[in-house]
């Protein structure tokens, strides 16, 4: 078997060296230079903490309900906290809690499909029972108590996950109405949206996470030790995120409001179905989607040069 050469390698020696040189700078630049931060909050550590929370929550629900339940993070974006009210029905409730020591307000929203499926399963409904459309009425007194109990249980796991990012604790505040959220002065937050599957129909759980507890007083995120610093391993052993992206689309708010099942969204990607593979946030290859065993996979194809990246993806 031939040994690999620079020409056959997935990444050239120059690209690998550049990637290794870039990693420490990315991990430390925000702590050392507040002006270098991106205008939008995009904390990878917080995202990973939320992904860990989702995994633990799905595992707990699967064990408790004796069925496979998938609980996964499907998106994070920055919002003004009152915008959360736009995702609620007039009769919806949301769990309010504080993130200590700063006392910043946060909100946990259980969608009605998720809440009523969880309620029916917890009170003995079998896994084969066909789900019914959840009511849009006000929650009853018993339902409010169950909502609070389910939300507080989630907060215990959420607190454990967030402590991997920074030192904090969560204090339950109670259930509040849609109007209270709409009139909130809590400021900006990260809206984390979780998809729940396994209850008969897709459900959602949303958490409005205040930004302040995850930012230092100086305005930069606290620097965490890198994997190499924490374990003493080589930078070559530090995991990096590889992302295969089908494409993106830009739409107005009015256009998104008109979306419905069956709508077609045009993406800014080639019609041949090829993907863009990013390594360390940099576009490196075109690829073709496929499968390997039970998992989805991509086969690398054409290498993307710096010049091409600049022309096609500005």
Image (cartoon, rainbow, N blue to C red):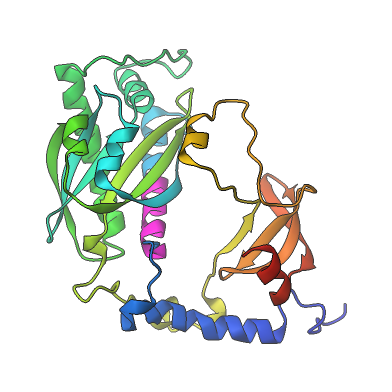
Residue drawn at point x = 37 percent, y = 22 percent: 117
Residue drawn at point x = 65 percent, y = 63 percent: 313
Q: Image height check: is 302 above or below 47? A: below
Range of residues picked out in magenta: 43-56
- Residue 244, picture quadrant: bottom right
Residue 238 at x, y = what percent? 51, 75
For residue 245, say whether it is visible: yes
Q: Image height check: is 29 above or below 120? A: below
Residue 44 at x, y = what percent? 42, 63
Left or right relative to 126: residue 275:
right
Left or right relative to 222: residue 27:
right
Residue nearer the viewer, 92 or 6:
92
Residue nearer the viewer, 297 or 21:
21
Dominant secondary-structure state across the stretch colored magenta: helix
Q: Image height check: is 44 above or below 37? A: above
Name the quadrant of the N terminus: bottom right
Residue 111 at x, y = what percent? 34, 29
Residue 98 at x, y = what percent? 15, 50
Residue drawn at point x = 67 percent, y = 62 percent: 277
Left or right relative to 59: residue 289:
right
Confirm whether the magenta stretch covers residue 54.
yes
Q: Image height check: is 106 above or below 62? A: below
Name the quadrant of the C terminus: bottom right
Confirm whether the magenta stretch covers residue 226.
no
- Residue 85, picture quadrant: top left
Residue drawn at point x = 42 percent, y = 77 percent: 27
For residue 230, say whether it is visible: no
């Amino acid at each position: 078997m031939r040994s690999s050469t620079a020409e056959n390698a997935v990444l050239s020696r120059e690209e690998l060296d550049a990637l290794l040189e870039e990693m420490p700078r990315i991990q430390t630049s925000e702590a050392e230079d507040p002006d270098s931060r991106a205008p939008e909050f995009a904390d990878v550590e917080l995202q990973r903490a939320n992904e860990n929370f989702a995994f633990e929550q799905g595992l707990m629900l699967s064990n408790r309900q004796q069925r496979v339940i998938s609980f996964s993070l499907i998106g994070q974006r920055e919002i003004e906290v009152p915008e959360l009210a736009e995702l609620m029905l007039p009769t919806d409730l949301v769990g309010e809690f504080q993130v200590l020591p700063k006392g910043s307000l946060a909100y946990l929203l259980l969608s009605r499909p998720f809440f009523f499926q969880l309620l029916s399963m917890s009170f003995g409904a079998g896994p084969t029972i066909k789900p019914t459309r959840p009511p849009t009425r006000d929650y009853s007194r018993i339902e409010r108590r169950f909502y609070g109990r389910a939300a507080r249980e989630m907060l215990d796991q959420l607190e454990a996950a967030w402590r991997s990012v920074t030192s904090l604790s969560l204090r339950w505040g109670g259930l509040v109405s849609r109007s209270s959220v709409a009139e909130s002065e809590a400021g900006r937050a990260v809206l984390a949206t979780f998809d729940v599957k396994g209850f008969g129909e897709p459900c959602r759980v949303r958490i409005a996470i205040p930004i302040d507890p995850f930012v230092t007083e100086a305005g930069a995120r606290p620097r965490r030790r890198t994997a190499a610093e924490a374990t003493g391993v080589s930078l070559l052993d530090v995991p990096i995120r590889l992302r295969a992206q089908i494409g993106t689309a830009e739409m107005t708010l009015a256009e998104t409001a008109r979306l419905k099942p069956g709508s077609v969204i045009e993406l800014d990607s080639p019609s041949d179905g090829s993907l863009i593979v990013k390594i360390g946030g940099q576009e490196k290859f075109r690829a073709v989607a496929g499968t390997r065993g039970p998992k989805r996979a991509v086969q690398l194809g054409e290498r993307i040069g710096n010049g091409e990246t600049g022309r096609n993806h500005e």
